[in-house]
Amino acid sequence: MRLANKVALITGAGSGIGRESALLFAQEGAAVVVVDRNDEGGGETVARIEAAGGQATYVHADVAQSADCAHMVQVAEATYGKLNILFNNAGIMRHDDDDAVNTEEEVWDITMAVNLKGVYLGCKFGIPALRRAGG
């Protein structure tokens, strides 16, 4: 188990690449903090990890919100005592975001808030926790 005794926080883990990564990290021994704004999807990911004998906790968070990103890291440290792995996976692409000419500015702003600002905020709050855990 390559990730035994490690704690991984994965955003966007309620479906897709995030869910599959969470399942793989848990299979490799990590305790996983499943972060998503889709409670049903996040809960399903946790249930699948636990059914396979792993450890997981769900945190509802919008990665475009500073307070939510601070909270997800706080939950990781409070629940498992540390954070070793941060996977800023959350991302969106709406069906009406198909080209620059026709994309509404509001759609662009939402996409950038999740896909760009979300990574920044994850790092802003996650990196200090990674350092506290020894790197």
Image (tube, rainbow, N blue to C red):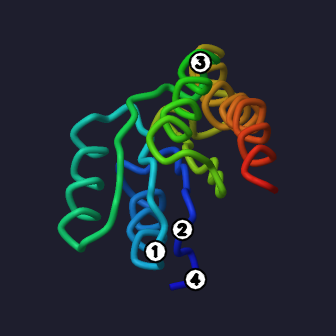
Residue 55 lies left or right of residue 63; in this view the side is left
Between discs 3 and 1, the one toward the N terminus: 1
Q: Position of residue 35 (x, y in %)?
A: 44, 41
Residue 90 occupies quadrant: top right
Give the residue at mark 1: 29
Find residue 96 and name its label. Answer: none
Q: Position of residue 3 (x, y in %)?
A: 56, 74
Amino acid on which disc 4 is placed: Arg
- Vertical relation: 72 (above or below) 87: above
Query: Disc 3 and disc 1: Cα gap in Å?
Result: 30 Å
Circles 1, 4 touching at the beta carbon (< 8 Å): yes
Between discs 1 and 2, the one toward the N terminus: 2
Residue beneath the point at 66% across and 56% down: 84
Find residue 2 and name its label. Answer: 4
Find residue 5 and name its label. Answer: 2
Label 2: few (<14), some (14–19) or many (≥20) C-alpha neighbours in 10 Å: some
Pick whichever, 29 or 121, lies toward us.
29
Label 4: few (<14), some (14–19) or many (≥20) C-alpha neighbours in 10 Å: few
Residue beneath the point at 25% across and 72% down: 53
Give the residue at mark 3: 65
Q: Secondary structure at mark 1?
A: loop
Residue 36 occupies quadrant: top left
Q: Secondary structure at mark 4?
A: loop
